[in-house]
Amino acid sequence: MKKYLFLILMTCVPALANAERADYRIIPQPKSVQVDSTNTFTLRPGMSIAYDAGNPEVSRNAQFLRQWVEELTGVKLALAPTDKKAAIRLSIGLAADKKAKKGKKGAELTDQQKEAYTITVNKNGIQIAAREPIGFFRAAQTLRKSLPIIDGKAASIDFPFVSIADEPRFVYRGTHLDCARHFFSVDVIKTFLDVLALHGCNQFHWHFTEDQGWRFEVKALPELAKKGSVREQTVIGRNSGVYDGQRYGGYYTQEQCREIVNYAAERYINVIPEIDLPGHMQGALHVYPNLGCTGGPYPVWQIWGVSRDVLCAGNPETMTFLKTVMGELCEVFPSMYIHIGGDECPKDRWKECPKCQAKAKELGLKNDGKHSIENQLQTWINHEMEKFLAERGRDMIGWDEVLEGGLTDNGIVMSWRGVKGGIEAAKQHHRVIMTPTDYCYIDYYQLKDQWHQPMAIGGYLPLSKVYSFEPLIPDQLSDEEQRFILGPQVNLWTEYVGSPEHVFYMLLPRLDAISEVQWCRSDQKDFDDFKNRLPRMKQLYDRLGVNYCRGVE
Ligand code: ACM
Ligand code: ZN
């Protein structure tokens, strides 16, 4: 009998010791987390989530939460909007606001404050409060990342008592993906968006066009994507002179783009499309050689780098082409920001092209010692684009080269060649997105030992360096100037990244690092603590089936 009792105890003890338990040490770290680990609330299968079913956005977020709990723990919860005894309750309105508003009119909220939420776990269950439905989404992601990851079904999950109050630091929290050098399917883009949403990222910068391929359907120009997306072959490695002999192509129909926009919006991500102009255009020139200064022919480029053949600034058909493209782009993408590229536009052809020079003369452009004629010609194009977009209620973003010919009235500068351009623009009271190569170019290697990693463009950008980025540059910008920095972004160029596995390898976990730069106050950041929180995120990536870099430097 004693022996049997012993055996029963021995089988029970591990089960008790291994009670499944939530852990709130997640990435990005919430603004404030106060845990009382001595007490727990136990969530069991069949318990319910209550919420305002009259609000479709709130309902969707409740469904996300239910889905994520089941995916990670096997615990099935019920959606029971009116259940007064529900274990998880979603309610609009923050307790802090109710207190503060007594007798006072509320001040205008910032966009970050609109994302705020609180999670309170006590003996009554899990209470989620948010100012707006987006806060429920953020809270659901926080709970998702706090869950234990179980093979099979957990009998229950213990949630330590906690009080979480959270909201992001920056209004703009971006990630870019180049889908022009290599094309990624709609399903891959959706997984990419899921991963961004997991990290609180709210802007997807979708790079559509390059010398090596045009990937956005324009209905008024049906040949553009059909022919401009296909290169006959691709150089192997770094412009080795050896080619793979394989046709390569792919583009996104407008219907697919709309599908992506909706999918992203359900995850509170805005999609910023980029048509890179007037350079990086050989994909389009292949179809419309009349738009180049020399008249072509121009094959869709098969090598990496930047073509010297760009749109002819002096040909009136160029502006018609750009307005047709941008007009359809604005119809498909509701984003308040539209990216016009503007980077790396060699001026060799413009200097020699009679049409470009005639246009410069007509515009009265003169070298003023600071801005060359050709740089000002590019600014003229930027101005036209800015006006065109403004008429459609959109703001123009350009890479920091848009500063070179004198900045347009309201252009937003994406500072990539260091932070210098961003500083200059902020000092001129222009809005800025910080994405300097040294901290934000995740097409660089992330480990020193390059031989045992998938190929990268070069450079070395370890996780610790991404994590150390401070986008406000406080030693060079005043408090007033810092207000023009919208936020940071990481960029993933794909010359050497051809598969989804490689995309996620480059992205993760460097996205974890930038997510803390984007979300957390600088005094909250601690790389050692961050590293301790990473293994659970990696467990989650394993469960989600997305690749990531195993090493940490
Ligand atoms: C860029 O990396 N050419 C913006
Ligand atoms: Zn020209």
Image (cartoon, helix red, strand yellow):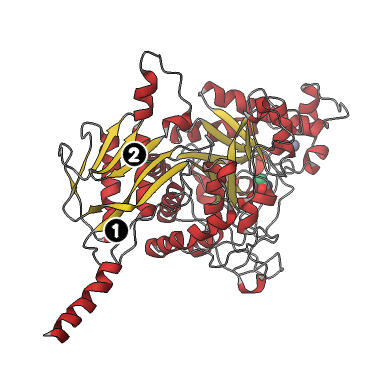
| Amino acid identity at mark 1 | Glu
**Residue 89: image x %, image y %?**
24, 40
Q: In the image, is 52 to the left or to the right of 357?
A: left
Residue at numbered disc 1:
71
Q: Residue at x 63, y 30 (%)?
A: 319
The answer to which image quadrant residue 83 occupies is top left
Please tell me in which quadrant of the rendered image residue 4 appears.
bottom left
> Depth check: 329 or 470 in front?
470
> Viewed as shown, does residue 278 lie left or right of 272?
right
> Which residue carries the number 2 mark?
136
Asked whether, in this view, residue 367 is left or right of residue 144, the answer is right
Q: Is residue 477 visible?
A: yes
Q: Which residue is found at the position 66% from the left and 40% from the top?
A: 290
In the image, the residue with mark 2 has its CB under 8 Å from the nearest atom of ligand 1: no
Q: How many marks?
A: 2
Callout 1: SS = helix
Viewer can see residue 280? no
Q: Are marks 1 and 2 in contact (CB under 8 Å)?
A: no
Amino acid type assigned to the residue bearing label 2 in the image: Phe
Apparent side of residue 443 relative to residue 102 in the rendered image (left or right): right
